[in-house]
Each structure stands twice: as C-alpha cells, then as structure tokens.
Image (tube, grey):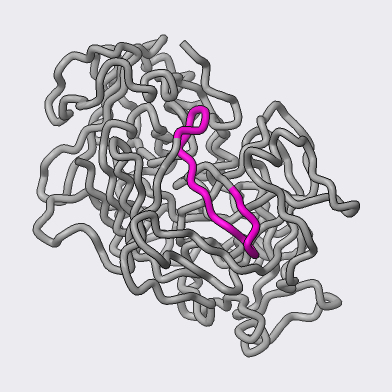
C-alpha cells in the first residue's frame, strides 16, 4: 500500500494557522507597509483591503468581491493523496490541492533572477513569474505541508474555468500569497488552495470572501466540485449544523461538527470529553488531537473507524473509513459504488496520526500579534474575552477543551459533501 505523502498530513498548526502573522487592527484600521501608519477605512477600501466592523469583529465590511452569477463546476483530479484543481493567476497556470482546512490562495513565486525553485515542483504546481501588484499588506510566515514558507501578499487576476461551459469564477484583483522562501521540514512542496471562507480580523483575506460563493459541493465519486452563489441544501433537508469555533479563538471558521459517537475497530470509544470533526480535504487520512491519541482510550492500530454526527432533526450522519476494500455494512453508510480496483483505495489509505491542537490553550491567538499589542480578534493583548464570546463558548456544548478529529479524504472520497458556507449547514450523501 502506498504511503500518503507527509505534505498532506498537515499539523493542526497549519490547519488552524496558529503561526499566522497579521496586521494590527485599531477600530477597523490595518497597519500596512506604509511607514507604519494605519490606513483609514476609506484608504483600505480603495486598495481592496478588508475593514472590520467595530460592533462585530467577525464581520468584514468593505472587502472586495466579485458576483458569481451562476453555478461553476470544475473537475477534480487525483494528485498523490489528495484532490487537485487547476486555475490561473494573471494568465499563468497553476495546480493546487483542494483544501477545506485552510483559507488562502497561495502560489510559489519565482526568484529575483526569474528562475523557480525545484524544477519538478514548478512543473507540477506552477510558478508565478513577475512582481505582481502590491496590496499594502506586510509579508508573513506560514506553515504548510511540513514547511515554513515566507509569503508576499499581492494582487492579480484569478480565474477558475467552468468545465461544462464558458465563463467560471473570475476575480480581477484577487489578493493572493506569493511564496518566496522555504525552510523545509520534510514537506513535498505542494500548493494548497484554501476553501475556508470566514476568519478572524487580523488573518489575511481568504479566497472565498473575495467571491460571491455561498456554497460548495464536492462530488468525490464523480470527481467534480461545484461553487454556487446560492445555498445548495434545501430547507427540508436534514443537514448537519456547523459549529463556528472562532469565538474560542480559532483563526478561521473550520467546517466543524460535534461528534456524537466514535467507533474504532468495532468498539465504541468512551470519549472523556466532547469531540469535534473538522472536514479537511487537504488531509489524506485522519489526524487526531494529541490528547485523544495519547489518552489510551483510542484502539490502535486503527483498522476501521466510523464518525457519527447528529443532524438538525435528530438523525445521524456517518463518515467511515477502513484499511479493507471489502467493508462491513454499517448503519448510515451507503455501499461504495466504485469497483475494488478504483484508484482511490490506493490514493487514500486510512492513516491515523496525532497532531498538536493549540486552539483551546490559554493565550492562543496572541501569536498573531507579531510584535504588535493586538490579538487575532483585533483586541489588545491581555483583554478579557468578550461576554458574547464567552456565552457562545458555553452554549456550543464543547466544554473547555474538546478533542478534535481532522477528517480527510480516506473518509470523504466515496461520498458527496455539500457545505452551505454562509448558512453554516452541511449535508453528507
């Protein structure tokens, strides 16, 4: 069995952007590379930069977006432990891993002499040549695919072509990250295209917030993805309710649901605290928060696993993966229609790995300050959490420090996953 590449088994730090460095925000002002002077809200809008509502730090105002008039459908291709799509920036072609666990549009950039890094990576993923237009946003350091990368934030014309007809998704002045340096830690140099939409104020602009995309549909058996300007889940559908973890300090709104039951190797895992499942298409198998992995209650090695989640009307949605191709029937899991010779069995083995998840640790979020006296939510360092955030944390039913499962392609590839991003609902078929 082929071992999935380490670049796709990302750490929780990468998935949650814990090392994200963002600009300081003072009542809606962003400190940019303009001599340290805070830009006014009007200047930010004129430059295409998002501002932040003073009454609601999670609501962006003035962010540039382009209307999406109709549904866009793009093909998915297998690319070594993940699904990939192709797109262009300033008419230069790129390929990237479809990643619901991260928010950004990132590409590798050429060196000052015009050459790219590793030739094989440049040929496979693309390499942006040219300086591109500036954004006024300072450079950042990110952690993706096992590598620390330096990122310059630029603007360019982004295009994602419709597979079935002309047109598609186009943004004339998309804010994207141009990777200009690497500090390798064993990654394979893959590029991730992030489809998480909502973020905390001091995190860089996401791809989806610059579009009119309201819903995503991943038809993995059909190897296609749809982006829609309207919700795709009918109000009569018994969907899952997504939990927004940003009030707890997570930098982005992951596509997370509470886990009702976790069954491993046929045994019910006696969870000692609440648990959430994060849908993460950029992960190959299953990444488990260290507290759960090291607790001794999780049977190892994991040969099969079922993750049960409660729907809005009290039903159960189940995601399942196994090391076996012939799988035992399980309630709520449809029969896999793919033949036993399907490539997906080799592409997406059930590999379970522990990852650190610092989201719920005291002081998490202050790492965004980067020398500035502000946290990721825009408040001064040392500021007590707002009453609203405290209330939301209490009513989500997750307790102080829930376990986290990053659910990857091994669980997803036989299914169709629909996410109404703006409505915070998800349907698994």
Q: Quadrant of residue 90?
A: bottom right
Q: Which secondary structure type mostly characterizes the magenta part of the structure?
A: strand
* Residue under the point 63% across and 38% down: 124
Q: In which quarter of the image is residue 306?
A: top left
The residue most toward the front is 165
Count of numbered marks: 0
> Residue 404 or 176: which is nearer the viewer?
176
Up the image or down, 190 lies above or below 342; here it is below
Residue 233 placement, left or right of 389: left
What quarter of the picture does the C terminus occupy? top left
* Residue under the point 67% across and 36% down: 189
The residue most toward the bottom is 42
* Residue under the point 33% across and 32% down: 413
Residue 269, image x and y in percent?
29, 20
Up the image or down, 325 lies above or below 101; here it is above
Residue 155, image x and y in percent?
67, 69
Quick check: can you spot residue 35? yes
Quick check: can you spot residue 378? no
* Residue under the point 42% across and 64% down: 168
Q: Does the magenta stretch include residue 419?
A: no
Q: In which quarter of the image is residue 412?
A: top left
Up the image or down, 218 lies above or below 145; here it is below
Residue 365, image x and y in percent?
60, 53
For the magenta stretch, what is the residue range?
78-94
Residue 41 placement, left or right of 326: right
Q: Does the magenta stretch include residue 85?
A: yes
Residue 55, image x and y in percent?
47, 80
> Residue 264 or 341: which is nearer the viewer?
341
The residue most toward the right is 113
Up the image or down, 199 lies above or below 309; here it is below
């Amino acid at each position: 069995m082929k071992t999935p590449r380490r670049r796709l088994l990302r750490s929780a730090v990468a998935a949650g952007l814990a090392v994200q460095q963002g600009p300081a925000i003072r009542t809606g002002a962003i400190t940019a590379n303009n001599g340290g002077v805070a830009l006014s809200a009007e200047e930010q809008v004129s430059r295409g930069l998002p501002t932040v509502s003073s009454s609601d730090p999670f609501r962006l105002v003035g962010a540039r977006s382009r209307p999406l008039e109709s549904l866009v459908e793009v093909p998915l291709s297998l690319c070594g432990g993940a699904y990939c799509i192709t797109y262009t920036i300033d008419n230069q072609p790129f390929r990237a891993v479809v990643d619901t666990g991260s928010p950004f549009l990132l590409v590798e950039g050429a060196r000052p002499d015009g050459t790219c890094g590793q030739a094989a990576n440049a040929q496979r993923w693309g390499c942006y040549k040219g300086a591109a237009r500036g954004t006024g946003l300072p450079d950042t350091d990110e952690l993706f695919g096992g590598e620390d990368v330096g990122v310059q934030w630029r603007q360019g014309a982004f295009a994602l072509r419709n597979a079935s007809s002309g047109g598609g998704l186009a943004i004339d002045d998309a804010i994207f990250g141009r990777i200009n340096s690497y500090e390798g830690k064993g990654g394979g140099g893959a590029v991730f295209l992030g489809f998480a939409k909502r973020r905390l104020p001091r995190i860089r602009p996401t791809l989806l917030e610059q579009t009119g995309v309201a819903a995503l549909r991943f038809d993995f058996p059909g190897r296609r993805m749809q982006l829609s300007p309207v919700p795709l889940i009918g109000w009569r559908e018994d969907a899952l309710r997504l939990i927004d973890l940003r009030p707890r300090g997570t930098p982005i709104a992951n596509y997370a649901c509470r886990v009702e039951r976790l069954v491993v190797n046929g045994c019910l895992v006696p969870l000692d605290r609440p648990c959430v499942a994060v849908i993460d298409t950029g992960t190959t198998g299953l990444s488990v928060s260290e507290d759960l992995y090291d607790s001794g209650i999780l049977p190892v090695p994991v040969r099969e696993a079922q993750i049960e989640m409660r729907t809005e009307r009290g039903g159960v949605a189940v995601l399942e993966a196994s090391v076996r191709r012939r799988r035992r029937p399980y309630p709520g899991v449809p029969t896999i229609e793919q033949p036993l010779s399907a490539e997906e069995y080799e592409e997406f083995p059930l590999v379970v790995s522990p990852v650190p998840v610092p989201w719920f640790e005291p002081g998490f979020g202050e790492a965004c300050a980067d020398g500035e006296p502000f946290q990721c939510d825009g408040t001064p360092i040392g500021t007590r959490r707002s009453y609203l955030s405290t209330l939301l944390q209490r009513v989500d039913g997750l307790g102080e420090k829930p376990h986290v499962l990053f659910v990857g392609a091994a669980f997803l590839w036989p299914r169709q996953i629909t996410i109404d991003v703006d409505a915070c609902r998800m349907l698994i078929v």
